[in-house]
Amino acid sequence: MIILAALMALQTQGADPIADVLSADLEFPVAGEIQEIVEPDLSCIGQYIEGAALICRAEPGTIISLGDQSGTADSGGWVILGINRDSDEEMTLTAALPSGELIEQVHPIEQREYNIQRVEGVPPQTVNPPAEALALIREQSRMKAAAYTSRWEEAGFAEGFIAPTEGIISGVYGSQRFYNGEPRRPHYGLDYANNAGTPVYAPAAGIVTLANPDMYYEGGLIFIDHGQGFTSAFLHLGAVQVEAGDIVEQGEQIGEIGSGGRATGAHLDWRIKWRNRYIDPALVLTLDPASLR
């Protein structure tokens, strides 16, 4: 009787206890309506190992950094990054989203041991150039440095890479080189030995930033920027079939294997550079960006 009297008293004052309870329930989500917490989207493929490349996808405009180098996600969200031959034991990957959110990941970098390769029979003038060749070498060095500043706005790398030619692998990335018994810089390329005249193809789409049939050290030389400055170099070509400014598609023939410059026989030396880092082409061939689409 006391409870009934209390309810009647509330009703007479205009209160509705049942309606109040139902109204309060509306403040809480029912099953199936709980909002999921969405983490900022960042997906990358590639290995965290010296000489590797990473391809990432994020919101367009996201700035992604790996150590002291960075790239900005293009209109499709694509970014490519690289790890140098001699890297720190760990590197920090950061992504600064346009919203102001920040993703930070610390990755251990697998350290590699590199071979020592001794190459004999190299033309002596390409090991110790004569004084009269130094002006030409300096001028060609400036040409190469200028070509490496390219930042093509398309993302040819987003289709992945194919081998640029056929042949026996006669030299690998990272090897410490001795030419005619004298120590020189490490070898940063992947060498394909084959007959002179063997076709060379673009491993991915890009813009040609340098095409010269007769460089002092490289012989016939082509640079292709595959996007964001991720640049392939093709050395010792016997024929150059493109010009600077050309847009090439993956699989398009760009030249032929030769033996010009500092070479002992016909082969293609394929190198890749991103910013100031030299990348292992063999690792690039393992990337499959399809998983990021």
Image (cartoon, rainbow, N blue to C red):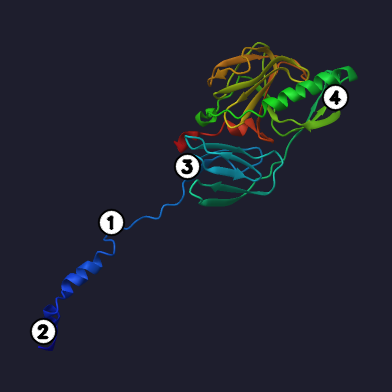
Q: Residue at x 56, y 43 (%)?
A: 63
Q: Residue at x 57, y 51 (%)?
A: 105
Q: Which amino acid is tagged 1?
A: Gly
Residue denoted by label 1: 32
54, 258: nearer the viewer: 54
Q: Residue at x 37, y 55 (%)?
A: 36
Q: Which amino acid is tagged 4?
A: Asn
Q: Earlier in the sequence, mark 1 or mark 2?
A: 2
Q: Residues within 10 Å of mark 2 (few under 14, many from 20)?
A: few
Residue 138, how many percent across, how many down? 80, 23
Query: Mark number for residue 4?
Result: 2
Q: Which amino acid is tagged 2?
A: Leu
Q: CA distance from mark 2 to mark 3?
A: 61 Å
Q: Secondary structure at mark 3?
A: loop
Residue denoted by label 4: 180
Q: Which mark's residue is nearer the viewer, 1 or 4?
A: 1
Q: CA distance from mark 1 to mark 4?
A: 73 Å
Furthest toward the right, the residue is: 131
Residue denoted by label 3: 59
Q: Is residue 48 above or below residue 192?
A: below
Image quadrant where one finds the C terminus = top left
Q: Earlier in the sequence, mark 3 or mark 4?
A: 3
Q: Earlier in the sequence, mark 1 or mark 4?
A: 1
Q: Earlier in the sequence, mark 2 or mark 3?
A: 2
Horizontally, residue 256 falls left or right of residue 182, namely: left
Q: CA distance from mark 3 to mark 4?
A: 51 Å
